[in-house]
Amino acid sequence: MMKTMTCRQLGGACDLEFHANTFEEMAELSKQHGMDMHKRQDAAHLQAMQEMQALMQDPEAMQAWIESKRQAFEDLPEH
C-alpha cells in the first residue's frame, strides 16, 4: 500500500524519498523535511520555499498545485 515520492516531486529541491500510505502523510513528511532544511539554511530548499510562498499568494493556483501533487501520488504504483 506504501507509495514513494521524492522531495523534488513534491516541489522541493532534492531526491530524498518519502514513503507513505496517504497523500496527507506524504505532505506531512515533506513539510517536516522542509522545516529541517530551513533550520540548516539549505540554499536550494530555501529557493524552493520562496517559490512555494509566492504560489501561496494565489489560493486558486495553490489549490491547483496541491491537486496536481495529490493526483501524482494517486497515480503512483503501490509497493
Image (spheres, helix red, strand yellow):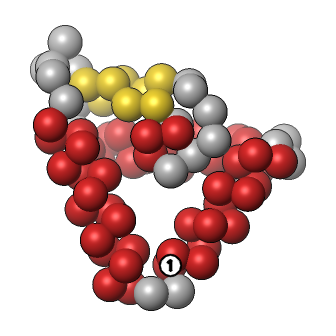
Count of marks placed on residues = 1
Residue 39 coordinates in the image, percent (x, y): 81, 47
Residue shown at 19%/30% (left/top)?
Answer: 76
Q: Could you say which is closer to the camera, residue 25 or residue 44?
A: 44
Q: Amino acid at mark 1?
A: Met
Residue shown at 43%/40% (left/top)?
Answer: 9
Instruction: In the rendered view, tell whether residue 23 sits above or below residue 68.
Output: above
Left or right placement of residue 75 versus residue 50 in this view: left
Q: Could you say which is closer to the camera, residue 34 or residue 65?
A: 65
- In which quadrant will I find the N terminus? top left
Residue 32 in sight here: no
Instruction: Indicate the secondary structure of the residue bearing disc 1.
Output: helix
Residue shown at 65%/56% (left/top)?
Answer: 48
Instruction: In the rendered view, tell whether residue 55 sits above or below residue 39.
Output: below
Residue shown at 32%/62% (left/top)?
Answer: 66
| Residue of label 1 | 56
Residue 61 coordinates in the image, percent (x, y): 37, 79
What residue occupies the far top of the structure in this picture?
Answer: 79
Crowding at mark 1 (Cα within 10 Å: few <14, some 14-19, many 20+): some
